[in-house]
Amino acid sequence: MRQKRAKTYRKLMALYSMSFGFRQPYQVLVDSEMCKAATDSKIELAKQLNSVLQGDVKPMITQCCIHELYLLGKAQQPAVDLAKTFERRKCNHREPIPGDECLTSVVGETNKHRYVVATQSQPLRVKLRSIPGVPIVHINRSVMVLEPPSDATLRSKEQNEEQALHASGSEKRSAATTASEPPRKKKKGPSGPNPLSVKKKKKGDIQPTAAKEPAKDSVGEKRKRDEDEAPAPSDPQDEPRRKKKRRRKAAADPVETVES
Ligand SMILES: [Zn+2]
């Protein structure tokens, strides 16, 4: 695999791990057409899944999907043999149903078991894109491809991040106050000492009119500014929080940046 593609896939799988809790070995539901495509184009399916998903994989096949292969008869024996090496996923469909429907029901509405789906079915792929957090793999001209994240996946990822930020608010707050202290000091630093030293000199040397008034003004302004800043310490999370968010995004979002 080319370096750039490997990097894209690695970052994409990092997204699935961080935002949706995917863990290795990745459970990959393989459909019957995928088994056929793999044997037809002499692809080592498990090995390719391994490299595309950038980690250990556990290929699985549902009862309905392997049943579909049995129906194809002797001509597809290699595909059957391949499927037999996979772990069988019980789907509890007493009468076998079409593979697409079976996989749809096994993935469910939320993909709570965190399956990767390897399928050649275009309609199924379209359907799975509406469920957040379903990595989809297919074979295109003998090349195994991991789809870019769907809109539903990206939206859900952003929501998860928002929630994470609010949920751990107390933790963030303590971190935020410590983080916000240095900048506050900086602001006071340069403005603080200067007026004081200026003031002292002026007390001794130049008492009368012209010099005094500007000095007072500047002190007044400083005070005003300090008062304006005063609310900041009571609500210090805002700025660091925004910073964190940005940093997080940069870390979790690399897939998009690679492409552009
Ligand atoms: Zn089934």
Image (spheres, rainbow, N blue to C red):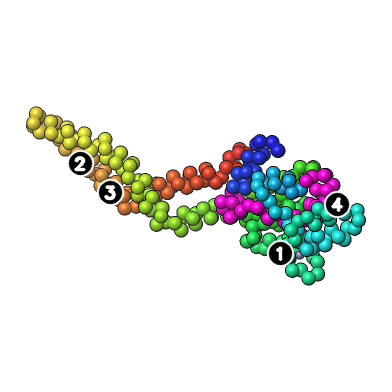
Which is more N-terminal, label 1 or label 2? 1
Q: Give me the C-alpha separation between circle 3 and circle 1.
A: 57 Å
Secondary structure, mark 2, is helix
Q: Few, some or many C-alpha atoms within 10 Å of disc 2 (few <14, some 14-19, many ≥20)?
A: few
Q: Give me the C-alpha separation between circle 1 and circle 4.
A: 27 Å
Viewer-side label of 1, 4 = 4
Instruction: Please provide percent x and percent y for residue 250.
Output: 52, 43
Residue 230: mark:
3
Viewer-side label of 3, 4 = 4
Q: Amino acid at mark 3?
A: Ala
Secondary structure, mark 4, is helix
Q: Amino acid at mark 2?
A: Gly
Q: Amino acid at mark 4?
A: Pro
Residue segment shown in magenta: 15-44
Instruction: Please provide percent x and percent y for residue 37.
Output: 81, 49
Q: Amino acid at mark 1?
A: Ser
Q: Is residue 188 magenta?
A: no
Q: Is mark 1 within 8 Å of ligand 1?
A: yes
Q: Is residue 34 magenta?
A: yes
Residue 213 horizontal side relative to residue 172, left or right: left
Residue 78: mark:
4
Q: Few, some or many C-alpha atoms within 10 Å of disc 4 (few <14, some 14-19, many ≥20)?
A: some
Name the residue that disc number 2 marks. 220
Identify the image quadrant of residue 195: top left
Viewer-side label of 2, 1 = 1
Instruction: Please provide percent x and percent y for residue 44.
Output: 78, 46
Which residue is painted at 65% across and 45% down in the image? 54
